[in-house]
Amino acid sequence: MTVTDDAQVFVDAFNRSYEEKHMAFEEQFWGTKMALKGSEFSSENLSRTKKEMEDLLSDPEVLAKAQAFRAKIEEESDLTKVLDCIIKSCQCYTMPPEVKSIREETAKLEGDLEMARNGMTLGYTDKDGTFVQASSVGLRNKLSTDADENVRKAAYEGLCSIGGFVLDHGFVDIIKKRNQIAKKLGFVDYYDYKVTNAEGFGKTKLFGMLDGLEKGTRPIMVKAREEFAKKYGNEALKPWNMPYKMKGSIVQKMDPYFPFSLAVERYVRSYAAMQITYEGATMNLDLLDRPKKYSNGFCHWPRVAWQPPNQPFVPSTTNFTSLADPTAVGSGLTALRTLMHEAGVSFRELYSV
């Protein structure tokens, strides 16, 4: 066998192992985030499957083999591109043993916090004094559409309660351990570590870019707030009043044109008209808001679309979620916007492979 043949065997084995471990983790991620029933979904299993996936990516033998094969193959090809991806991914997870142990402790704390947050009783006190359960999405919807300022303020206070809750359930300890990991690896802090791995430059450069953007747009923001206060009064600048004053009436007027019942159909028709077929992908949709469900829309791929050498194309499996309340004003537009966005992300992932 040639070096190229040996490298291909290595890449094929790595891909099979990574897909298996990634799917196991994503199954736990989906089950815990969606609060699915079943004893197989737990914080412990989420931490375990994440550790198993990261163990593969942080294995020094895997990185060494990938680098050795890459050094011996001069001609650029799909194989060298995959080797480069493996090397870059593994380098992001490479840590000394003492740092890795801290990372494992952090992952356990993160899983515990996620489960606690999922079980948090969130909501607001209605004008008659009744506590109404609502997700963060439902509370934000109240800020935009409810005509009663007291209800909007209560919804805002409900959102603010999340901060105190996560602080009381280990978030500070997570921050400390994350920063401890980053500093041991030579970074300023965990944010600097993540930005560098993702973007190729640190937070100092990023903040320089963002500071320039903020400084350049600040006069526009100041003027806009002045005009807003002049039109609606200074009380309109309160955080529970701005969303309603800015778009409340518009959302209500648009609502009849975007019923929730047509959201999925309109998404499907729109993508079909663009001739997007998803190449046989499986898409799991969880669209409705409910208690204990993770209160943010996202799209994950338990299996990415890929083409094994001399084997049939492997279509992707996609999980995406939104938090629509069919009874709420604006829910249809929110659902459609989420569908178009997350389904678009699924399409991008499919055709970027």
Image (spheres, rainbow, N blue to C red):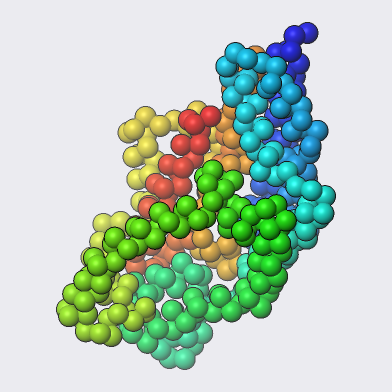
| Number of marks in picture | 0
Q: For residue 94, what is the image quadrant?
A: top right
- Is residue 319 visible in this depiction of the protein? no
Q: Quadrant of the N terminus?
A: top right
199 or 328, nearer to the observer: 199
Q: Is residue 206 left or right of residue 260?
A: right
**On screen, residue 32 above or below 117:** above
The location of residue 20, given as percent across then percent down, is: 73, 37
274 or 228, nearer to the observer: 228
The location of residue 194, given as percent across then percent down, is: 59, 52
293 or 246, nearer to the observer: 246
Q: Residue at x 62, y 21 (%)?
A: 80
Q: Is residue 225 left or right of residue 278?
A: left
**On screen, residue 166 above or below 277:** below
The location of residue 228, given as percent across then percent down, is: 21, 75
Q: Is residue 148 left or right of residue 224?
A: right
Q: Which residue sits furthest bottom? A: 129
Q: Residue at x 44, y 84 (%)?
A: 154
Q: Residue at x 70, y 70 (%)?
A: 173
The location of residue 341, given as percent across then percent down, is: 41, 48
353 or 312, nearer to the observer: 353
Q: Residue at x 50, y 28 (%)?
A: 279
- Is residue 127 visible in this depiction of the protein? yes
Q: Which residue sits furthest top? A: 1
